Image (cartoon, rainbow, N blue to C red):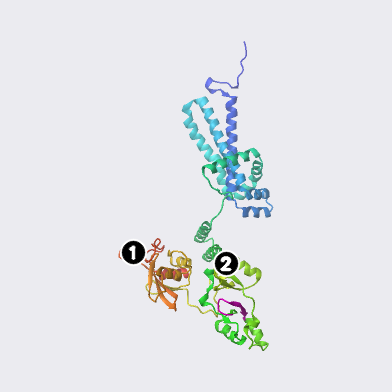
């Protein structure tokens, strides 16, 4: 009697498990496990910031140095990982389909699809990605050597790059080669969420917002404008300039030559007092001047702050595109953009915002449009103007007289006080929603204010000021 050979375990004809099925099942298990590792690596590398990786490297964490190098070129390592992850999923699905079709025919494919979907979603996606989010530092440092090894496989890297190039042909554009980034809007939203959750104080949130906005602010928005500048002629006596210093409470005064557009230097109060003590009070102030610094009015305040710190000066003259004096800016003006108004015993100024009976408010015409919008929950438009006074001037189209008003952005702006041809105070009222409301003067206004069309301005403005 001849013996027969079998390629699998014996039993009924339908229950024979062939070597091919065993190998295929083992391949499916290996592919699912590999997909889980790759999914963990993708999530960890995507959600870990470079700053955190640098901190881990400084602490001497194992694998952190390799991780830091990977994050320097995140896009180069993520593409091969994603390609391999997709390959594992498709490979497992293909093998399962072949095995099920061979044993059970087409009738078992639907059931196999559901089972495969559940297994891959739970074991190869949800579990590793959830763990990576819960243990980002540990996951990233542990998979860093493995991902680094993958990035060294040239054929895999070339294939991923070629496929990405094909995608760029289908959807032209530079893409996002630097990897995940955080926008200013996201940072501001995150600060708002942290403040609402009481993780940070409201004052800390305000400081974060000012710091972010600081980088976009230019000198023109924070300077003391030309009409408000206090200057003294170069021929003034030292004793007379000291009187001006005492009267205005300033420690530095610009000194002009032939006019305000000819600033020849800056007089320091301590230099003036030293000169008077040395019996030089009758000398011209031009003998004790220090050089004036000039900056364009469009210069970013962040760059100017660094320049003032590096070159150790506290006052600069802002000039316009024609070389004329546009205003002056001090170190205090720049710091106030970050920490708010700094008022000492010598500062006597009208409040920037004054609530009025009936819900109206009166504001300084020099207030920035963004500041007014934030305080009043309004939506005043931006344009060639920086201040609410500039907006009123632009919409009127002429030098106003007291009481003239325009309606814009759901608000009524009225010239409340004037100094010559200049608006000093503006009264702001919220418009009602009645159908007979007057049309907007000028371009169509933006959407209704955030606080509601009929909410009084005085209450919310006072709350915002607090």
**Residue 304 versus residue 121 in the image, above or below:** below
Local secondary structure at mark 1: loop
Tell me which label, 2 or 1, sits earlier in the chain: 2
Q: Dot 2, how many residues are within 10 Å of its Cα: few (below 14), some (14-19), or many (20+)?
A: many
Q: Which residue is mark 1?
A: 433
> Residue 54 placed where, x, y %?
65, 54
In which quadrant will I find the N terminus? Answer: top right
Q: Considering depth in this image, is 401 or 134 the residue closer to the camera?
A: 401
Q: Residue 33 is drawn in which quadrant?
A: top right
**Residue 301's disc number:** 2
Q: In the picture provided, is 62 more to the left or to the right than 262?
A: right
Count the marks.
2
**Residue 83 versus residue 283 in the image, above or below:** above
The magenta span reads: 257-268
Residue at image position (41%, 68%) is 395
262 inside magenta stretch: yes
Judged by depth in the image, the label closer to the viewer, 2 or 1, is: 2
8 inside magenta stretch: no
Residue at image position (51%, 44%) is 171
> Residue 331 placed where, x, y %?
59, 72
Q: Dot 1, how many residues are within 10 Å of its Cα: few (below 14), some (14-19), or many (20+)?
A: few
Q: Residue 255 is drawn in which quadrant?
A: bottom right
């Amino acid at each position: 009697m001849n013996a027969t050979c079998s390629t699998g375990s014996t039993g009924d004809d339908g229950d024979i498990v062939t070597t091919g099925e065993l190998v295929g099942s083992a391949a499916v298990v290996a592919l699912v496990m590999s997909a889980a590792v790759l999914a963990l690596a993708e999530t960890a590398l995507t959600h870990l910031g470079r700053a955190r990786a640098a901190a881990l490297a400084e602490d001497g964490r194992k694998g952190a140095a390799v991780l830091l190098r990977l994050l320097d070129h995140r896009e180069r390592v993520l593409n091969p990982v994603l390609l391999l992850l997709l390959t594992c999923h498709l490979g497992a699905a293909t093998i399962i389909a072949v095995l099920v079709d061979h044993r059970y025919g087409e009738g078992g494919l639907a059931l196999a699809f559901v089972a495969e979907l559940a297994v891959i979603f739970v074991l190869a996606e949800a579990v590793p990605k959830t763990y990576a989010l819960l243990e980002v530092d540990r996951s990233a440092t542990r998979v860093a050597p493995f991902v680094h090894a993958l990035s060294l496989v040239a054929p895999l890297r070339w294939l991923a790059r070629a496929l990405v190039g094909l995608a760029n042909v289908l959807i032209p554009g530079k893409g996002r080669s630097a990897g995940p980034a955080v926008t200013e809007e996201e940072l501001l939203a995150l600060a708002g969420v942290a403040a609402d959750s009481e993780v940070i104080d409201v004052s800390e949130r305000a400081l974060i917002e000012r710091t972010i906005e600081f980088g976009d602010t230019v000198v023109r928005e924070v300077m003391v404008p030309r009409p408000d500048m206090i200057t003294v002629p170069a021929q003034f006596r030292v004793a007379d300039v000291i009187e001006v210093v005492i009267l205005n409470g300033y420690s530095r005064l610009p000194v002009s030559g032939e006019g305000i557009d000819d600033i020849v230097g800056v007089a320091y109060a301590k230099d003036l007092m030293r000169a008077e003590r040395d019996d030089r009070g009758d000398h011209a102030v031009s003998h004790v001047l220090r050089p004036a610094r000039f900056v364009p009015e469009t210069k970013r305040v962040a760059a100017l702050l660094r320049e003032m710190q590096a070159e150790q000066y506290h006052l600069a003259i802002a000039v316009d595109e024609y070389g004329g004096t546009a205003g002056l800016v001090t170190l205090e003006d720049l710091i106030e953009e970050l920490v708010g108004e700094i008022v000492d015993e010598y500062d006597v100024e009208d409040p920037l915002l004054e609530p009025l009976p009936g819900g109206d408010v009166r504001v300084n015409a020099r207030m920035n449009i963004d500041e007014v919008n934030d305080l009043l929950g309004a939506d005043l438009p931006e344009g060639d103007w920086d201040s609410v006074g500039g907006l009123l001037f632009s919409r009127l189209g002429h030098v106003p007289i007291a009481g003239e008003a325009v309606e814009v952005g759901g608000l009524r702006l009225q010239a409340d006080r004037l100094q010559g041809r200049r608006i000093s105070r503006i009264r702001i009222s919220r418009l009602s929603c009645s159908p007979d409301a007057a049309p907007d003067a000028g371009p169509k206004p933006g959407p209704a204010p955030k606080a509601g069309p009929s909410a009084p301005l005085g209450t919310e403005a006072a709350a915002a000021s607090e």
